[in-house]
Amino acid sequence: MINIISKRLNNNAMCYVLPKKGYNEKEVMIAFNYGSADTDFIADNIEVNQPYGIAHFLEHKMFEDEDINIFDSFAKLGLSANAYTNFNTTAYYFSGCDNFEKGFELLMKMVGSLYVTEENIKKEKGIITQEINMYKDDPYWQIYFNVLKAMYSKNSIRESIAGDAEDIEQITKDMLEKSYNSFYTYDNCVIIGCGDFDSKKFFEQAENLKLGSTKAIKNKVEDNIYKKEYLVNMAVNKPIYHIGFRDSLNNNTINRLCISNIIMNLLFSKSSRLYERLFNDRLIDDSFNFEVLQGLDYGCTIIKGEGNFYNRIIDEIMTEVKNYVSYGIARDNIERIVKRLKTQMLFNSENISSFVSFAADCYSKNIEMLDIYNNYDKIDVDEIINTMKEQYTYDNVVLALIKES
């Protein structure tokens, strides 16, 4: 069973301990409910609009310090430190076997202050611009955001997490400080420790984190499908396609996540009849896979693959969905899928790094990990059929393509 100990600290930060008895390795993460999609918000009753890529830029700058090299300081403790930014989360973490408390103090010190100068901002702009240019040559990175651009006309998840070169050039010291002061706060923060250690001592040490307490209000936008097909020409051996279906956002995030996972496995797991038919007809190969993407103000499923048969695959999906809507879904079929998904959650919880990142992701979506696990058993077959009927239609499908010109 998944074991979680949670506590709201006196400083109002949320704290989780994920116990792993007998494990030598430990990991600690401090994450903020702030990601690349959070470019428009209200702070101090003033509407703020910032360039794409600023959350990722701020992540890089948090490792700057006037007096020490933070990466070297972690390394001297025998610890490995890193960070990441996604649509909803910016997370800082370290892992290792020894010097756990010292590493935790260093991590708290790092996120507890921001050191930016005009000089180090200018230097970072050059580094991140090189990173952006590298991604421009990656067809898989490009098509992922192309399918999101097709599905969303306004939501910032349609933009690359790092932004583009023009966005980066706009970033200023004042903007970074505004983002830090608005989102790197106690009530927007989660502290996660995973491993074999005393949870009481961890909670006590976590009280030493120094942050502000002002919380920004994120703007929500009404959105619609931008375009049905998004084609880009690049040098690829064969076409790469992403097929996207947008969620209607008419129920809670946990329910949407569970239903989407069930539908994707029902349609595309390797034991499904549709997958077997597509594979046997040589319409798909081993590159074929899928992804469920869910947030508070977005949700979609993405089917990915390579080859020329993307239109035929869309037709086959619609036919399979129509059959399930017309003739129903056997309850034991759903039960097998639910058992598999819950087992996968338990398996993933044994991997410290995956478990910690999953906890941070859940926090940013205002959901509890155990609620996801338990919610799978509450999903009704009619909910699944109604979702398929509503969302998996020709009106709601988009196609992103990368083909050689």
Image: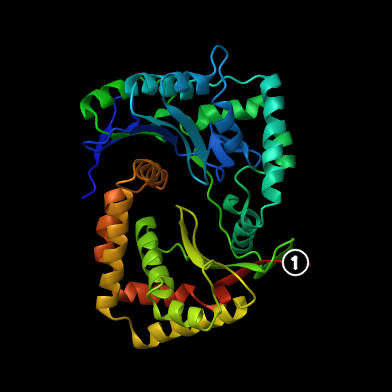
Residue 60 to residue 39: above or below: above
Q: Residue at x 63, y 50 (%)?
A: 159
Amino acid type, label 1: Glu
Q: Residue at x 49, y 78 (%)?
A: 279
Determine if residue 47 is in view.
Answer: no
Element marked by disc 1: loop
Q: Residue at x 64, y 38 (%)?
A: 50
- Mark 1, Cα crowd under 10 Å, few <14 / some 14-19 / many 20+, is few
Residue 223 position within the rendered picture, expressed as x and y whole percent measured from the top left: 58, 59
- Give the quadrant of residue 141: bottom right
Determine if residue 308 is in view.
Answer: yes
Residue 295 position within the rendered picture, expressed as x and y whole percent measured from the top left: 46, 53
Locate residue 252 relative to residue 74 in the image: left or right. Answer: left
Residue 272 position within the rendered picture, expressed as x and y whole percent measured from the top left: 39, 77
Query: Residue beneath label 1, please?
Result: 404
Residue 42 to residue 213: above or below: below
Residue 189 to residue 294: above or below: above
Locate residue 364 relative to residue 400 in the image: left or right. Answer: left
User: Which quarter shows the C terminus?
Assistant: bottom right
Which sits in the foreground, 269 or 33?
269
Which sits in the foreground, 180 or 23?
23
Which sits in the foreground, 34 or 83?
83
Total labels drawn: 1
- Give the quadrant of residue 258: bottom left
Looking at the image, the residue that sits furthest to the right is: 405
Which sits in the foreground, 199 or 130?
130
Locate residue 405 relative to residue 113 in the image: left or right. Answer: right
Colouring chosen for the image of the structure: rainbow
Residue 218 position within the rendered picture, expressed as x and y whole percent measured from the top left: 51, 42
Looking at the image, the residue that sits furthest to the top is: 67
Locate residue 11 relative to residue 374 in the image: left or right. Answer: right
